[in-house]
Image (cartoon, grey):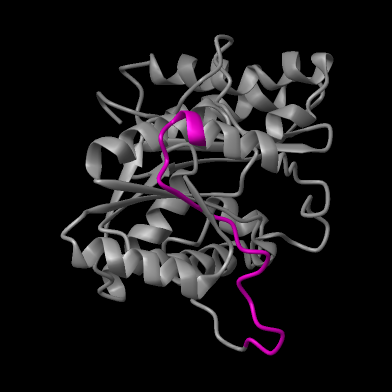
Amino acid sequence: MEVIGSVGRMQRQAAVWRAAGLKIAFVPTMGALHEGHLSLVRLARKRGDRVVVSIYVNPTQFGPKEDFARYPRPRRRDLELCRKEGVDAVFAPSTLYRSDASTRVIETEKSLGRCGRHRPGHFDGVATVVVKLLNIVQPDVAIFGQKDAQQCDVIERVVRDLDLPVKIVRGPIVRDRNGLALSSRNTYLSAEEMEVALNLPRVLRAVKSKRQMTMRQRERMARERLRRVKGLTLDYVEAAGAYLCAAVRVGGTRLIDNVRITGNG
């Protein structure tokens, strides 16, 4: 497995693979890898001849009061996990932005509502870094996790609108045995906070099971139930297509989740 820190070197390696007729599958991450990320790597292995994982904590998608500085960065562990999964290259640049960078990518529809309402500028940072990474790694397929449903929506729209030659694939949510969607931020939770956080997937599962309810009724029920949980602050419950999405705060940790709704929806 190669560990590549240079943009130019990554582009050259991608060009060599493509010239040889090899299909590149790409998994962008911010590191602190867990089973959710590794499930995406395994999906990438099925979709490509060469698998690239990026590890880059992107500063432009963090707000001024968010957790950029304390975001976990266990580099040695991340690289070992990638080796065990047979990753061909890890792209781990120290920075992707020049000091005088003045260009960014802005998506103006899918980024509205949900997390976009509560994290101004977040999806500008996401869209910009993803376009940069796609230009650098030059993949045929890029794999993103469904847990970040709105991120997937934004990226799919950006790729479509900018005619980028890559197929976006969504990997399913991976959950802990207790039902909580896996996230690098789960490590912030104390044992007591974890018990509070478990109300998020429980409530979403409960409203999903109400097959005679409309989506709007499910939204209202989820909001009411989550607002009653002591120690949990609700950011939103919002429908997006076939998905019911939610974000909450437990202590200083922000958690997101979503479920696909079938039936009356």
Between residue 235 and residue 12, name the one nearer to us: 12
Between residue 71 and residue 47, name the one nearer to us: 47
Q: Quadrant of residue 12?
A: bottom left
Q: What percent of the width, then of the height, locates residue 19?
A: 20, 67
62 shown above or below 31:
below
Between residue 140 and residue 14, name the one nearer to us: 14
Q: What percent of the width, then of the height, locates residue 176?
A: 56, 16
Between residue 203 and residue 145, name the one nearer to us: 145
In magenta segment, residue 93? yes
Q: What percent of the width, then of the height, locates residue 27?
A: 43, 47
Question: At x 64% / y 18%, what residue is drawn?
Answer: 199
In magenta segment, residue 153? no
Question: At x 65% / y 38%, what residue is drawn?
Answer: 32
Q: Is residue 219 visible from the viewing direction of this image? A: no
Q: What percent of the width, then of the height, locates residue 18?
A: 23, 64
Q: Is residue 211 visible from the viewing direction of this image? A: yes
- Horizontally, residue 255 falls left or right of residue 36, namely right
Question: At x 82% / y 47%, what residue is drawn?
Answer: 70
188 shown above or below 1:
above
- Horizontally, residue 262 falls left or right of residue 182, namely left
Q: Quadrant of residue 16?
A: bottom left
Question: At x 34% / y 64%, what residue is drawn?
Answer: 14
The C terminus appears in which quarter of the rendering? top left
Which residue range is magenta in the image?
Answer: 83-101
Q: Residue furthest left?
A: 21
